[in-house]
Image (spheres, rainbow, N blue to C red):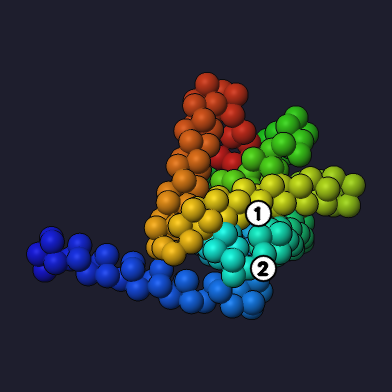
C-alpha cells in the first residue's frame, strides 16, 4: 500500500470516527458513558477517559449537553474509580509489592519511598498524578497499599483532584466546541491536541524534576 493511499484511508477513518462521535455525544445517555469510562480508567489506564470528557465538553459547547453535568459525571466517575483502586491497593498489598519488584527492584522499599513522598507532598501529589496517564492508578493504589487514611485524607484530596481534572478536560472541549459549532472534527482534534500538549508539558517538567533529584520518583516513577 502506497504512502499517500494509506494516509487518505487513515484520514477517512478519522473523519468517520469524529462523525460517529458527533452523533453519539449528542445523546443524553452520553453522560453515563462519561461516568463509566472515567471510572474504568482509574483501574484500567488504557481506557480513554480524558478524550471522552473532552468530547462531552465539545457537545456541551455545541449546545447538545450541559457542561456542568459533563464535569460532574467525569468527576464522580473518576473519584469512584480512584476509590476502587485505593481499596484494591489496600486489600492486595502483597500483590502490589510483587508488581513493584519487577526489574529487580525491592517492592517493599518502593512502597516505603511512596509513603515518604506522600507524607512530604501530601494531596498535591495526588492532584498531580491525576493528570498523568497511568500515574493516577499507580498513585491511588499506592495510597491504599501504604494505608493512607481514606476518609480523613484520601476522600477530600481525591475529590478535589477528580473535579479539577474533569473541569480541565470539559472546559477545553467546551471552548473549542463553542468556537467550531458546525465542525465537530476540527473542535475535537484541536481540543485533543491542546490536552496532549499540556500533558506533554507536565511530563517534561516531571522528567526534569526527576533528573535533578527533586521529583516524585517514589510514587509516579516507581
Work out whether 150 lies above or below 66.
Answer: above
Image quadrant holding the N terminus, namely: bottom left
Q: Could you tell me if the residues under marks 2 and 1 are in contact, i.e. CB atoms within 8 Å?
A: no
Work out whether 144 lies above or below 122.
Answer: below
Extreme residue toward the right, this view: 152
Q: Which residue is pictured at 63% across the width and 44% down the height?
A: 129
Image quadrant holding the C terminus, namely: top right
Q: Dot 1 lies on which element?
A: helix
Using the image as rendered, state which of residue 100 and residue 213 is in the foreground.
213
Q: Dot 2 lies on which element?
A: helix
Q: Is residue 59 visible?
A: yes
Q: Which residue is pictured at 43% across the width and 75% down the height?
A: 20
Work out whether 26 lies above or below 72.
Answer: below
Q: Is residue 101 visible?
A: no
Percent x, y for residue 73? 70, 65
User: Would you name the residue on which mark 1 appears?
Assistant: 166
Q: CA distance from mark 2 to mark 1?
A: 11 Å
Among the 4 quarters of the image, the one containing residue 106: top right
Nearer-N-terminus badge (2/1):
2
Q: Which residue is pictured at 59% across the width and 78% down the height?
A: 27
Percent x, y for residue 49? 57, 61
User: Would you name the residue on which mark 2 appears?
Assistant: 35
Percent x, y for residue 118? 74, 37
Percent x, y for residue 6? 18, 66
Using the image as rendered, state which of residue 216 and residue 92 is in the foreground.
216
Position of residue 24 in the picture relative to residue 10 (left or right): right
Q: Which residue is pictured at 64% across the width and 77% down the height?
A: 28
Amino acid at each position: 500500500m502506497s504512502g499517500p493511499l494509506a494516509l487518505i484511508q487513515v484520514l477517512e477513518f478519522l473523519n468517520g470516527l469524529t462523525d460517529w462521535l458527533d452523533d453519539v455525544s449528542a445523546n443524553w445517555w452520553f453522560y453515563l458513558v462519561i461516568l463509566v469510562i472515567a471510572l474504568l480508567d482509574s483501574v484500567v489506564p488504557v481506557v480513554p477517559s480524558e478524550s471522552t470528557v473532552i468530547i462531552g465538553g465539545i457537545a456541551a459547547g455545541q449546545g447538545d449537553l450541559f457542561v456542568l453535568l459533563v464535569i460532574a459525571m467525569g468527576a464522580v466517575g473518576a473519584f469512584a474509580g480512584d476509590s476502587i483502586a485505593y481499596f484494591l491497593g489496600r486489600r492486595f498489598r502483597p500483590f502490589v509489592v510483587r508488581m513493584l519488584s519487577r526489574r529487580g527492584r525491592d517492592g517493599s522499599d518502593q512502597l516505603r519511598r511512596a509513603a515518604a513522598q506522600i507524607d512530604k507532598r501530601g494531596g498535591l501529589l495526588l492532584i498531580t498524578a491525576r493528570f498523568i496517564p497511568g500515574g493516577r492508578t499507580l498513585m491511588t493504589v499506592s495510597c491504599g497499599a501504604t494505608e493512607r487514611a481514606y476518609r480523613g485524607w484520601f476522600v477530600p484530596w481525591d475529590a478535589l483532584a477528580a473535579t479539577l481534572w474533569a473541569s480541565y478536560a470539559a472546559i477545553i472541549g467546551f471552548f473549542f466546541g463553542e468556537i467550531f459549532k458546525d465542525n465537530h472534527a476540527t473542535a475535537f482534534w484541536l481540543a485533543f491536541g491542546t490536552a496532549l500538549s499540556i500533558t506533554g508539558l507536565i511530563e517534561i517538567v516531571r522528567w526534569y524534576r526527576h533528573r535533578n533529584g527533586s521529583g516524585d520518583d517514589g510514587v509516579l516513577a516507581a
